[in-house]
Image (cartoon, helix red, strand yellow):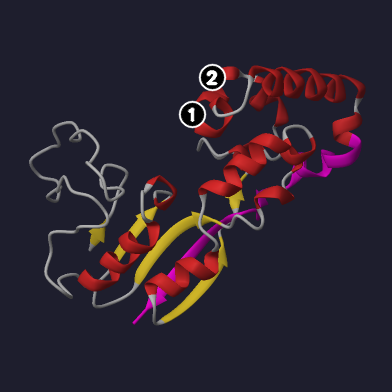
C-alpha cells in the first residue's frame, strides 16, 4: 500500500523530512508527488488523505499515483462545488471561497486517475476533532476560538477585517438566537454530510 502524505507533495522541492519514525513502522520515502521513485505497478493499492490541495501539480501527482499502482486508488478530498453549502458561508464567504479554490474539481481529479471512479460523501461525526471547519457544524462556538481556526490555512489567507466581522456577527447571532433559529437543527444531528468525499478509482 502506497500512502502519499503531506511530506510528499508538489513537483518542486519536497518539504523537510519527517521526524524520526519508530523502526517497526513501514518505510517512509522523502519525495514529491509528481516524481514518485517507484516502478510501474509496484503497489497493490494507494491512497492520499486530504493532501492533494497541497501539491503544486495535482494532475501530475495523481497520474504518478496511477502509474505506480496496479489496483485501486483512494483519495480523501473535498468537493469544491459543495464547500459553499456550509453555514460558514453566511458569516465568512471569503474563507469559504478561498477554501473552494484550494481543491481541484472532482471531474479533473477522476480524469487524472483514469479508469472507473466512484465518489461517496464521508459523514463527519458530531464529536470530530479534525481541523475542518465542517467538523464544527453543530458547535459554532468552537470557531470563535482563534486557536481552532489557526489549524486551517484559509483563515490566515483573509484579512483581519474578515475575521473580526466573523467574530462579531457570529457572536451576536449566537447571543440573540438567530443562528439557532436557522441552523440549530445541526446541534442534534449525529453526523453531517458536507464537502468531504472519498474518491475510489480502479484501472
User: Residue 171, image x and y in percent?
Assistant: 79, 19
Q: Nearer the viewer, residue 190 or 100?
A: 100
Q: Which mark is residue 147?
A: 2
**Residue at mark 2 to residue at mark 1: CA–CA distance:** 7 Å
Residue at (14% x, 71% y) in the render: 42
- Indicate yes or no whether the magenta region holds residue 197: yes
SS of the residue under disc 1: loop
- Mark 2: which secondary structure? helix
Can you give x and y, in whole percent of width and height, for residue 146 in the image? 59, 18
Residue furthest toward the left?
A: 23
Compared with 169, 71 (above or below) is below
> What residue sits right under mark 1 in the picture?
151
> Where's the N terminus, which quadrant?
bottom left
Residues shaded magenta = 181-203
* Residue found 74% across the figure and 24% down from its top: 166
Q: Which mark is residue 64?
A: none
Q: Residue at x 85, y 32 (%)?
A: 179
Left or right, residue 59 beside residue 22: right
* Percent of width and height locating residue 41: 18, 75
Left or right: 69 with respect to 62? left
Amino acid at each position: 500500500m502506497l500512502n502519499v502524505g503531506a511530506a510528499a507533495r508538489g513537483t518542486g522541492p519536497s518539504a523537510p523530512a519527517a521526524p524520526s519514525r519508530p523502526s517497526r513502522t513501514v518505510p517512509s520515502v522523502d519525495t514529491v508527488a509528481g516524481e514518485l521513485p517507484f516502478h510501474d505497478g509496484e503497489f497493490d493499492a494507494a491512497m492520499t488523505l486530504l493532501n492533494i490541495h497541497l501539491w503544486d501539480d495535482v494532475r501530475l501527482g495523481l497520474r504518478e499515483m496511477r502509474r505506480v499502482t496496479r489496483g485501486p486508488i483512494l483519495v480523501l478530498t473535498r468537493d469544491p462545488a459543495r464547500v459553499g453549502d456550509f453555514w460558514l458561508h453566511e458569516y465568512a464567504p471569503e474563507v469559504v471561497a478561498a477554501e473552494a479554490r484550494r481543491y481541484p474539481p472532482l471531474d479533473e481529479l477522476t480524469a487524472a486517475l483514469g479508469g472507473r471512479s466512484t465518489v461517496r460523501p464521508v459523514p463527519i461525526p458530531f464529536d470530530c476533532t479534525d481541523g475542518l471547519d465542517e467538523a464544527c457544524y453543530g458547535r459554532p462556538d468552537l470557531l470563535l476560538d482563534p486557536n481552532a481556526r489557526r489549524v486551517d490555512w484559509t483563515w490566515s489567507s483573509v484579512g483581519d477585517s474578515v475575521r473580526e466581522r466573523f467574530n462579531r456577527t457570529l457572536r451576536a447571532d449566537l447571543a440573540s438566537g438567530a443562528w439557532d433559529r436557522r441552523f440549530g437543527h445541526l446541534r442534534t444531528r449525529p453526523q453531517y454530510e458536507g464537502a468531504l468525499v472519498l474518491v475510489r478509482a480502479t484501472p
